[in-house]
Amino acid sequence: MPPIFSSLPPQKQGANKYKTIGILGGMGPEATAELYLRLIRIFQQEYGAKYDDDFPEIIIINLPIPDVVEKPTEEKRVEQMLVAAAQKLQTMGADIIAVPCNTVMSFLPSLQRAVSIQILNPVEEAAADVKRLGMATVGIIATEMTLSNQLYQEQMQETRFLIPDKKAQQQTTKIIMNILAGQKRDDDKMLLLDLIKTLKNSGAEKVILGCTELPLLIKDNIDTIDTVGILAKAIVREVISEKAEERENKP
């Protein structure tokens, strides 16, 4: 049986200018789409991208994993699906993988063992931003799974963290579920802004939006760290690296 796909001849421009980006997304789908749009805007606004071949090649997998927000009960299956998707992205030619989801970063060690390419994630990138800014106390709004696994605390052991109380956490979960369902409600936005204000008044220098759904509701807020935006900048940083530029000069 003949192969379904045939090899394309190498190109001098376009995807060959940059590393190929693999996005392991779908958690949730709209946050993945937002990351894609942020990448496109950065190339347009900061690098003058205009023609199709001015942009990097981007491979997106929208992975329909079981629930990890409201009632996470299938963690082993989630891990297996993530590992298989990461391997698929590498096989498809991705040079780096970005995961626009904070919650599933508890599976990062398994993911990194499964592939030989770099995996970028919002937890490590936000932590690096906090350290760069020299902040001693930060707030974090995230899923219960992210908080219970202390993903950010492990990255910033010298940082003091302020987290929502039980009632506020329940409200946060409802807000995230509403955003996942495409409902960006004004009352949810007000609740989230009130929570950010509470954490700030308690001593947080900034508040990490530690779920990639939350920046879909709260945008351009000076009191927050937007994990979608942080990840987008990290991806661009990697794909325009010196190593990526060397690919254009290969025969």
Image (tube, rainbow, N blue to C red):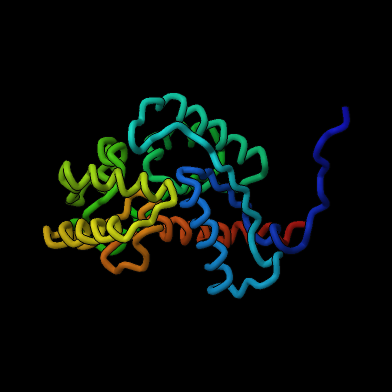
Residue 123 appears at what percent x and percent y? 36, 48
Going by the image, does 166 lie left or right of 229?
left
Residue 134, visible in the rendered structure: yes
Residue 191 appears at what percent x and percent y? 23, 56
- Residue located at (43% from left, 37% from top): 108
Q: In which quarter of the image is the C terminus?
A: bottom right
Image quadrant in which you'd find residue 221: bottom left
Image quadrant in which you'd find residue 165: top left
Q: Quadrant of the N terminus?
A: top right
- Residue located at (32% from left, 54% from top): 209
Name the foreground residue: 238 vs 149: 149
State the residue lying farthest toward the right: 2
Going by the image, does 190 lie left or right of 102?
left
Name the foreground residue: 88 vs 32: 32
Residue 172 appears at what percent x and percent y? 27, 47
Residue 38 appears at what percent x and percent y? 50, 62
State the residue lying farthest toward the left: 202
Residue 155, visible in the rendered structure: no
Image quadrant in which you'd find residue 200: bottom left
Name the foreground residue: 30 vs 228: 30
Going by the image, does 90 lie left or right of 238?
right
Name the foreground residue: 167 vs 52: 167
- Residue located at (63% from left, 71% from top): 49
Relative to 151, say whether 205 is above or below.
Answer: below
- Residue located at (31% from left, 40% from top): 146
